[in-house]
Amino acid sequence: MNSLKQADLVLLGGKIWTGFGNPIAEAISILGNKVQASGSDSDIKASIGAGTKVIDLAGRFAMPGLNDAHLHLISTGLLRGKVDATPDATPTRNALLAALQARAVKTPKGEWVTARGFDQTRYPDGRMPTAQELDAALPDHPVSVTRACGHVTIANSRALALAGIDVDTPDPDGGLIGREAGELTGMLAENAQNLVYDVQPTPSLAGIIDAIEAGGRHLLQFGITSCMDAAVGQVDGMTEIEAYQQAERESRLPVRVWATLLGDPGSSIVEPCHAAGLVTGCGSDMFRIGGVKVFTDGSAGGRTAWMRQPYIGQPDNFGIQMLPDAQLFELVDQYTAMGYTMVCHGIGDAAIDQLVRAYERVRAANPGHKHRHRIEHCGYVDAAINQRMLQAGILPAPQQAFIYDFGDAYISVLGAERGLTSYPIATWDRLGMKPSTGSDSPVCSPNPFPDLYAMLTRKTHKGTVMDASEILTPEQALRAYTEHGAYSQGAEKVKGRLEPGMLADIAVFSNDLLTADPEKILNETQCEITVLDGRVVHERG
């Protein structure tokens, strides 16, 4: 340690987890934006000079900054303009209607009232809102209320009329318009939601940059320093790429972003990105182009995930298959040939099987390719699918926050046998498949503590244990949130561990995440300090 240069930042007197399998350190020395060394206080004090900023951790726990491996940063920032329909804010359908009415009072007649976050499985009667209920509550405004999962929206009659939807409108490809007894119910699933979204006001470039900044600052408060934006182009196409580039130039990009490009037919931004030279790996450590996302199904809680077996009580409902095999295979072949990693959405076992077959074709055609193709969410698998994924080098990219927030809903729509084994992260970890984790915000809150709690206990918010064999050790859970997230982005050599030469992204928490009781992690832990690129970017209080 005698050869240490004068550090720019030193953290002393803590319990520092520098990465899976490493010894715990007391102190860490930062030079510029990189880790210089870690070790005992006495070792690291040798790098303190007149210009060094010193932080006394006073025994607190520090670790690599968290990497939320799947969320929607722009949508997380834009959420502030919508009515909060999450179960905590509106636990019943009547509470939701009251919150919508309160917003309507402040909104000129004829202008949109939008909400996000409801989960009908949390309502006492388990029933979705209807267009008729929204009509009665808000007769003077077009209204759209999006389910927590983002795969189902309920619209009122004014909104449906503005979108040109009547009882005879055909279901769009990969979408479903709800009808009952010859009337519209207001339910729009998957691609049918776009009919309403397309007639809502689109945020400006400045508004999208504001959302990037607001969403990123929100993440920093949780110790999240890196994320994957899981569908860039979904809000306003290439404007979102422009917004990210401008935010980075103007130092308004608070977190590192691995940008997933929307590749769905009809809304793809892959072609203009490719023409501009924006392929997987292009960019900086703050903003880098990631993979291409194609949706293959919906969500389990919304009964639109594409399953091999039907949903409980709905013998004809197997969910929604978004694309036929031939079209998906062609897209995966095309985008891979253009230089992109694939990070496609697949939740149901039928959708995952379809994706594995698509990725296996790429592997067979070019066995030596270096792409780390991912399956986003990857909710329902069996031993055979896992082995095929392992052989083809396919990474599962689940969100363990789903277990906490939606686990009971999975049991109710799929039954205990299928529901309890949702998102089997410990199985993947044992197989060496490097599972990452995240929140899918705004589907779930980016707050990492319910996610960690679910990995450590497999408990839902109601206390249901979702298959205890899938519990991770604390160190395995932290690895999923750091190193495995970095690996899934091809960045494991630069971030995810606090080792010499790696990026100095650090999160300091009020509780020791390796030893604290899971209930304490869930209910009492806060992020005290966040360091990004060697700079303190968040301090609580």
Image (cartoon, grey):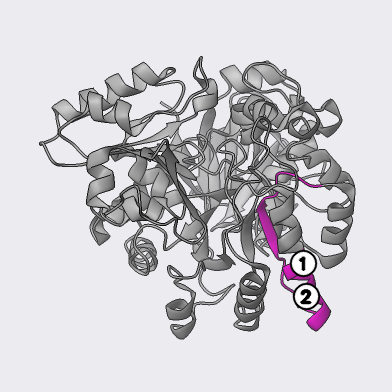
Q: Which residues are magenta?
A: 357-381
Q: Residue 275 or 21: which is nearer the viewer?
A: 275
Q: Residue at x 47, y 79 (%)?
A: 271
Q: Which residue is mark 1?
A: 357
**Image check: 99 left or right of 254?**
left
Res. 102 image quadrant = top left
**SS of the residue under disc 1:** helix
Q: Residue 17 or 297: which is nearer the viewer?
A: 297
Res. 159 image quadrant = top left
Image vertical order of residue 127 relative to residue 362, above or below = above
Q: Residue at x 72, y 44 (%)?
A: 480
Q: Residue 409 or 401: which is nearer the viewer?
A: 409
Q: Which residue is mark 2?
A: 361
Q: Check disc 1: other Cα within 10 Å, few if <14, some if 14-19, many if 20+.
A: some
Q: Residue 136 or 255: which is nearer the viewer?
A: 136
Res. 475 image quadrant = top right
User: What is the x, y in percent for residue 357?
Assistant: 77, 67
Q: Is residue 306 visible?
A: yes
Image vertical order of residue 439 relative to residue 512, above or below = below
Q: Are marks 2 and 1 in contact (CB under 8 Å)?
A: yes
Q: Is residue 373 magenta?
A: yes
Q: Quadrant of the C terminus?
A: top left
Q: Check disc 2: other Cα within 10 Å, few if <14, some if 14-19, many if 20+.
A: some
**Image check: 65 left or right of 266?**
right
**SS of the residue under disc 2:** helix
Residue type marked 1: Arg
* Alpha carbons under labels 2 and 1: distance apart: 6 Å
**Image check: 513 left or right of 273?**
right
